[in-house]
Amino acid sequence: ANNTDNTSLIDHFKEKYRNVDVLIIDDIQMLKDANKTKDEFFKTFDILQNDHKQIIISSDTSPNDLKMFEARLQTRFNWGLTLDIKPPEVDLKVKILKNKIIGMEMASLIEDEVFDYIANNSPADVRTLEGAINRLFVYTSLYLPDKIDVEFAKQALSDFLGSNQYLTNNLAKIRKVVAEYYDVTEESIKSKKRQANINKARQVGMYLASVTTEETIERIGLEFGRDHATVLHGVAKIESELKTDKELENEIKELRDKLTE
C-alpha cells in the first residue's frame, strides 16, 4: 500500500511539473546533494524544453560555477539567457521602501528624507528594507509621533541599522547641494549626460563624497550613476585642478560650508 501511495505521489509530481507553461526554480544550487531530485529535474527540463515551455532558474553563482552539477545539467543551464541581478541601487531601494508602506497608517507621516536615510544606511537586500519598515511601524505605534522625520527614524532604527551612521554629509545630501550650487538637476547628475556644467557638478560631488564621508567608491558610484573607475578618475581630476585653480578651490570651500548648514 505504501509503495502504491509513493508511486501515485511521484506520478502526481511528474504530472504537475511537466505540464506547466513556466517552471521557476529559486536557488538551484540547493539541489547539489539531492542526486535523485537532480535526475528528475534533468528529465523534467528536457520535457519542458522540447515542448517550448519557459524555464527560469536562479542561483547565487553563474552557470559556469555550478560545479556540483554534472556536465549535462551545466550545459542546459547555459542554453538560455544568463542575467546578473545586481543589488538594488539607492534610488531603487527608495522606491521599494515607498511601495512597502502603501496602505500603512504611518505612510502620510513619513518625510522623504527618511527613505534616503534608510536606503543609504541599509545593506543591499530587500529583507533588511522590509525589516526597517516593520521596525519603524512598531516604533511609530508605540510613540505616536506627529511626523516621522530623520531624527525619529534614527532613534527607531539605531540598533537595527547599526552605527554606520548617516553622516551629516551623506551622499544624497551632497548630490542635492552640488546640484543646487551648479544649477543643474539631481537627475542629470546621475544621467549619462556629459555637458560641461553637469560633468563638473558630478565630479565635484564625487570628490566631496570621497573626502567628507566614509563611503566606499562603489557606494559613491551608485549615488552618482558612475562605475568604480569613473569615480576614481573624477576625484583625481578635481584633486589635480585644485592645485592651480583658485576659483575651484573657493567653490569647494563654499560647498563644504553649505554641507555643514
Image: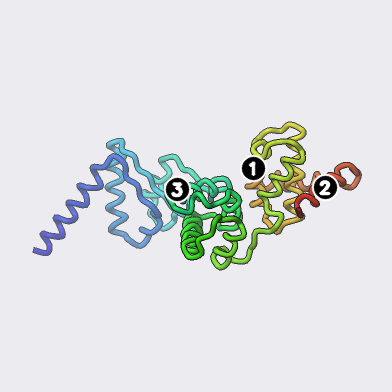
Left or right placement of residue 137 versus residue 199 in this view = left
Tell me the tag on residue 254: 2
Look at 49% across and 57% down and name the residue there. Answer: 133
- Amino acid type at circle 3 is Ile
**Which circle's residue, 2 or 1, is located before the other in the chain?**
1
User: To which residue does mark 1 refer?
Assistant: 225
Tell me the tag on residue 18: none
Q: Residue furthest top?
A: 195
User: To which residue does mark 3 refer?
Assistant: 102
**Which SS class for mark 1?**
loop
Q: Residue furthest bottom?
A: 159
Answer above or below: position of 202 versus 3. above
Look at 60% across and 62% down and name the residue there. Answer: 154
- How many C-alpha atoms fall within 10 Å of the one at disc 1: few (<14), some, or many (≥20)? some
- How many C-alpha atoms fall within 10 Å of the one at disc 3: few (<14), some, or many (≥20)? few
Quadrant of residue 121 within the rendered picture: bottom right
Q: Quadrant of the N terminus?
A: bottom left
Look at 54% across and 49% down and name the residue there. Answer: 93
Tag in front: 3 or 1: 3
**Which SS class for mark 2?**
helix
Left or right placement of residue 259 versus residue 44 in this view = right
- Amino acid type at circle 1 is Gly
Tag in front: 2 or 1: 2
Left or right placement of residue 108 versus residue 257 in this view = left
Answer above or below: position of 49 versus 87. above
**Which circle's residue, 2 or 3, is located before the other in the chain?**
3
- Amino acid type at circle 2 is Glu
Look at 17% across and 56% down and name the residue there. Answer: 9
**Where's residue 67, x and y in %?**
44, 56
User: Label 3 vs label 1: CA separation?
Assistant: 28 Å
